[in-house]
Image (spheres, coloured by chain):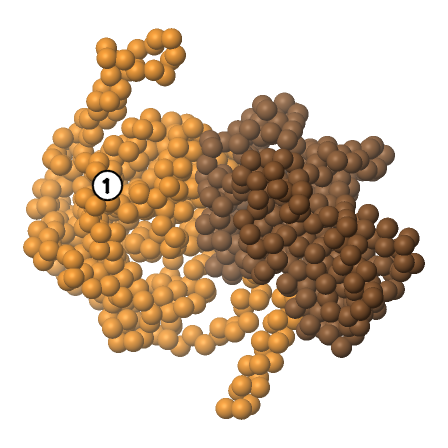
Chain colours: A brown, B orange
Amino acid sequence: MAKLNMVQAINRALDEEMARDENVITLGQDVGLNGGVFRVTEGLHEKYGEERVIDTPLAESGILGSSIGMAIAGLRPVAEMQFSGFSYLMFAQLEGHASRMRSRTQGQHTVPLVVRMPYGGGVRALEHHSESHEATYAHLPGVKVVIPSGPSNARALLAAAIRDPDPVVFMEPKCSYRAFREDVPEEPQVMEIGKGQVVQEGADVTVISWGAMMRPTIKAVEAAQKDHGVSIELIDLLTISPMDTDKIVSSVKKTGRCVIVQEAPRSFSPSSEIIATINDHALMYLEAPVKRVTGFDVVTPYFGKEQSYLPNERRVRHAIEETIGF
Amino acid sequence: MKMSEHSTIGISSKPKTKHWPDTCDSEAPCHTFSISSLQILDEHGNLDESRMPDVSSEDLVKLYRAMVLARLVDDRTLKLQRQGRIGTVPLCTGHEAVTCGATLAMRDEDWFIGSYRDLGGRLMRGEPIENGLLYYNGHEEGAVFPGGERTLPISIIIAAQCLHAVGVAYAMRMKGETETAVVCFLGDGGTSEGDFHEAMNFASVWQVPVVFVVANNQWAISVPREKQMHSRTIAQKAIAYDMPGIQVDGNDALAVYKATKDALDLARSGGGPTLIEAVTYRMLMHTTADDPTRYQPPEDLEIWAKRDPITRFRKFIEQKDLWDDEQQTDLEAQCKQKIEAAVAAFESRTDFKVDSPFDHVFGTSHTRIEQQRAEFLDMLKKESADG
């Protein structure tokens, strides 16, 4: 058992998967000699060589488009977008080809690839370096969207994404990269994509979050339990799409109350989909309106204003209090 | 552009090494270049023997038959669309020498990655005629065929396939298939897309075995070549990526064959990518939804009709005593029979699975998709019961 931060855990998953399967390769801007600007690919270039750890020309569509060809021809590419804010240059390749090749060819050609990208705010970065736009990708049929929240699940979910038969957008909460460490087992771990995780069971209210928002949410849950003696069921969504309907529905049926916490802008977002899912399957079990704590429908502000913009422990705690007091 | 020269292409002189090896100075200018162009059969079917590639008589006849079949399939497809029996179709008449000439130079294990004006080549790769009819009548079943593992489906998104070609080529080299190459087809409009330039650059940096064949048919729907680019040739775009670029007469199947064969030989020997510009003309509308009389000078069609790729090739093989009128009559009858059989098979096909889109969203099963499938099938059942 080693204590690793998220950067080290993701690096370990890449290393383990590259050692396990010679078809696994990684490519992107700065991923080679430099080890990635966040050092996620550190040491891989040295260990696996420049044919499998590729410093590409600086062109996001080129990175994903060539990865699609590699995947069709039997490789398992893990493409890095240096920041999610730069990823839209490859959007046409993802929507137009990666997401559809299986359907277009009724399964004759498939595109098993992973697009890793750091997302989210809280690191005092320049414009285009702080957005949480998972809904943009989650809206594409044929694409899986996974967001880990800590070192242990990041490692196990990345391994799953690399072994998955479909394109997976793997969004890494960059403000959690080096924020904390967890015990990570020595042997490789694989978690199932498409499943959320019940972090703690409870009876009075369901709280759902994912990615970087799990940290303030956990603190708020602990505080609310302590202050009000409530029993809270906490779900880490982990996969945004395809969303884990069963876990959400069974929990809300049990508790009758739900709070959703997301960093993303509010409208047309994962929280919208969670509420729609509850509406479809558990509406008559609700004791209170579903409450959500979200970013706003504005362009993500520059970092001078981001601490006031981002959801925080206090806002989550108030939302829980409001819901249980309804 | 004069079509008869054949000289070496490239930067006229190597840049002189100064402080940085990649700088250019007045003594060793980087900005002058020449583009070679290749024609072997002129528009009357006369052969330039000095440039005749090594092609067997059998292959010459095979190439001719492939071009005729493509033309007849295109004719029939247009009629089917006009009769309302299939949906919108892009047409390929005029492109036969480009697509068939290049495909003849390929091996079975090479990858064919193209767009929607490559009918002749696709048929040569073994795609059944029925497939195109299914595809253009709205069925994914027409996008794949047994044995088509290395013939990717049509890319409707312009030039996106160029990057797939580069990735496939990279994978082939990495997997040790060093004798395998990729031929990627696109059009003149495609060369304006970022993906084309990114693919050219990636292919160049990685030196992967890809041959880009640009069918320069002068039009991107209604936009003429001169509004598409200021460059005098498309072939010269290769110079920026330090790869060989050549312009060929795209209505001369032998020239296209030779250029593609040379490029494939280079690719197989580790020499990296090549760009081929095949100059041709789109003789029909972009798709059946388009009306070229709104923008196309009618005299263009007269000029290009005289340069027809099939007419000149027939003259050539007749001169070589490889072909006669009787064979022509037989060929046309055979093609028509094949086409009618395909039309009949296409029109009698009823085994479409209405919920097949749910089968192929993901390679894994998910509750959400299965719930929606059940809901969809249930709706259809109710709608059917309601009449």
Residue B385 in the image: x percent, y percent? 55, 90
Residue B3 in the image: x percent, y percent? 13, 36
Label 1 neighbourhood size at 10 Å, few (<14), some (14-19), many (20+)? some
Identify the chain of the residue marked 1, using the numbered disc in the image: B
Residue B52 in the image: x percent, y percent? 18, 35
Asked if residue A93 lies left or right of residue A120, the reply is left
Residue holding disc 1: B229
The quarter of the image holding the N terminus of chain B is top left
The residue positioned 61% from the left and 48% from the top of the image is A132
Residue B262 in the image: x percent, y percent? 30, 33
The quarter of the picture where residue A279 lies is: bottom right
The residue positioned 65% from the left and 68% from the top of the image is A276
The residue nearer to you, when weighing A174 against B163, is A174
The residue nearer to you, when weighing A312 against B37, is A312
Considering only vertical position in the picture, is B362 above or below B203? Answer: below
The residue positioned 87% from the left and 64% from the top of the image is A203
Asked if residue A100 lies left or right of residue A200, the reply is left
The residue positioned 37% from the left and 69% from the top of the image is B137
Total marks in image: 1
Considering only vertical position in the picture, is B360 above or below B245? Answer: below
The residue nearer to you, when weighing B355 against B27, is B27
Considering only vertical position in the picture, is B262 above or below A297? Answer: above
Q: Secondary structure at mark 1?
A: loop
Q: Is residue A20 visible?
A: no
